[in-house]
Image (cartoon, rainbow, N blue to C red):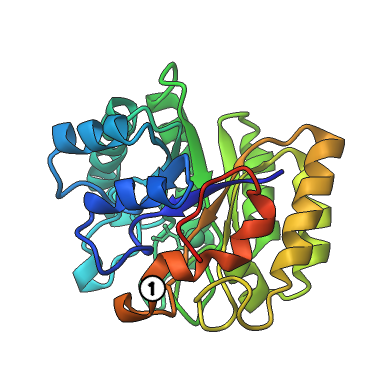
Amino acid sequence: MPQFAANISWLYPDLPFLDRIAAAARDGFTAVECTFPYDRPLRVLQDRLNEALMHLVLMNAPSGDWAAGERGLASLPEREADFRLSIQLGADWAQALACPRLHILAGCPAPGAHLATAWAVYEERLRWALEATQGSGLTLMIEPINAHDMPGYLLTEQAQAHAVAARIGSPRLKVQMDLYHCQRTEGDVLAQIRHWLPTGQVGHFQIAGVPSRCEPDQGELPAAAALALIDELSADTGWSGWVGCEYRPSRDAAAGGTSAGLDWLRPWRPEATMNAP
Ligand SMILES: O=C(O)C(=O)[C@H](O)CO
Ligand SMILES: [Mg+2]
């Protein structure tokens, strides 16, 4: 059975960030993931995770000036010093939170930038990050992201990410396969899962409906078939990661919010106590 993590940067939007951990626990999750936890007190975050008996399984390294349009620093030649600091900070937080996976966003090269240089810088930076975090137990993640949501983002296709991971060749560098981005960019998501999961280079899945990015069963993503395939291939290959629920709930608080929209998850967690009716 796939294991599911609630992405608390996206789910439970009607609650304060820290309260989303307990809300996810009430809905039967045993793990959460998030994007950027850095503006909350680390100690409080640790306490909330411990109180809810919740694992944090994925977070992002700081990714530059988000408000100014930056989406990671890893491929930006002029941001080397800031990139290194972001990895050090992200790794420190991940370790303090016992989070085993740290996503490093590739970044959006400036319009007109020399792309071959951006790719070379990206690979060199990932190698540096692996070296800098050696002995930490952290797995570093790279994620192809679709160009509708993140115009100009360097890494958009599964094959690009897998080629980078294969060239670098570290068991601590894995691909974060977000089925929402994959379906939007490349389509044919079942064939993509069947092709890439057995490589051993997929370290995490995420899921959302396409194109709305709401509950996974809304829209064109074959969510049930995708989860069944992950289940089947996990049994064949021994894959044992998480599926992050990274979507924007379609129901507001008055309509039951995130919890009421979790019906799609019910077949996959028969043992869990879920608040959803
Ligand atoms: O946007 C996504 O899909 C992600 O998973 C990243 O964390 C970007 O924040
Ligand atoms: Mg994602």
Residue at image coords 78%, 73%: 188
- Could one spot residue 10 in this view of the protein? yes
Q: Quick one: 115 or 218, which is closer to the camera?
A: 218
**173 in relation to 59, above or below:** above
**53 in relation to 141, above or below:** above
Rendering quarter of residue 167: top right
Question: Which residue is at the far right?
Answer: 236
Query: Left or right: 113 with respect to 221?
Result: left
Residue at image coords 61%, 30%: 170
**135 in relation to 196, above or below:** above
Residue at image coords 44%, 56%: 106
- Could one spot residue 198 in this view of the protein? no
Q: Position of residue 127 (x, y in %)?
A: 49, 35
**Dividing the image into four equal quarters, which quarter contains ligand 1?**
bottom left
Query: Left or right: 51 with respect to 136?
Result: left
Task: Name the residue tied to disc 1.
Answer: 256
Rendering quarter of residue 257: bottom left
Bin the neighbour count of mark 1 within 10 Å (Cα to Cα): few under 14, some 14-19, many 20 and up.
some
Q: Quadrant of the N terminus?
A: top right
* Total marks in image: 1
Q: Position of residue 143 (x, y in %)?
A: 53, 55
Query: Left or right: 238 with respect to 56?
Result: right
Residue at image coords 29%, 68%: 13
Q: Position of residue 66 (x, y in %)?
A: 24, 65
Q: Quick one: 80 or 52, which is closer to the camera?
A: 52
Q: Position of residue 109 (x, y in %)?
A: 40, 67
User: SS for tag 1?
Assistant: loop
Question: Which residue is at the far top?
Answer: 135
Q: Amino acid at mark 1?
A: Gly
